[in-house]
Amino acid sequence: MAKPFFRNHVVLQVFSVLGFYRSEYFTLMLLDVVSISPPLMDVYSSTVAQATTLGLVMYLFVATIIIWAAFGLVYYDEYLMVRGRVSGQGHQQRKINNDAHN
């Protein structure tokens, strides 16, 4: 019996036992299809080999979302709904208030 085969079955048994205590662990057993299917194993291998590049792409994606959200909050906050009411004064009103205080 090969080591990966034995290891996979031990991991599946652990998830099976944990599943009786917390049902979300049963769903992790679905990942066994990756070790059974050669095309999915190729996808896994190519993803792991390019992990650094994919991590940088994910960082750029998150940074872009944060930048858009920051500008949207500043310039379009009058359209932001928080718990059923309009959130803020809006960028123009804040500018008027800042000018009045100066």
Image (spheres, rainbow, N blue to C red):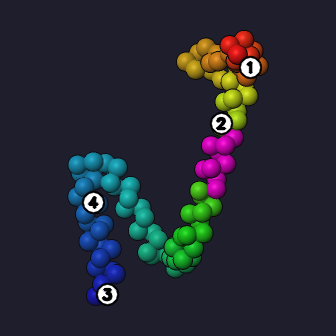
Residue 101 in the image: state x and y as whole percent: 68, 13
How far is the residue under mark 3 from the one under mark 4?
A: 21 Å
User: Where 20 falls versus 68 (above or below)?
Assistant: below
Segment tinted magenta in the rendering: 60-68
Closest to the observer: 96 or 28?
96
How far is the residue under mark 3 from the one under mark 1?
A: 70 Å
Q: Is residue 72 something one can see in this rendering?
A: yes
Mark 4 — residue? Answer: 16
Which numbered disc, 4 or 1, marks the residue closer to the eye? 1
- The N terminus is located in which quarter? bottom left
Which SS type dominates the magenta stretch? helix
Query: Which residue type does callout 1 highlight?
Result: Lys
Mark 3 — residue? Answer: 2
Residue 99 in the image: state x and y as whole percent: 74, 16
Per the image, label 4 sits on a secondary structure element best described as helix
**Badge 1 or badge 2: first in the primary sequence:** 2
Per the image, label 1 sits on a secondary structure element best described as helix
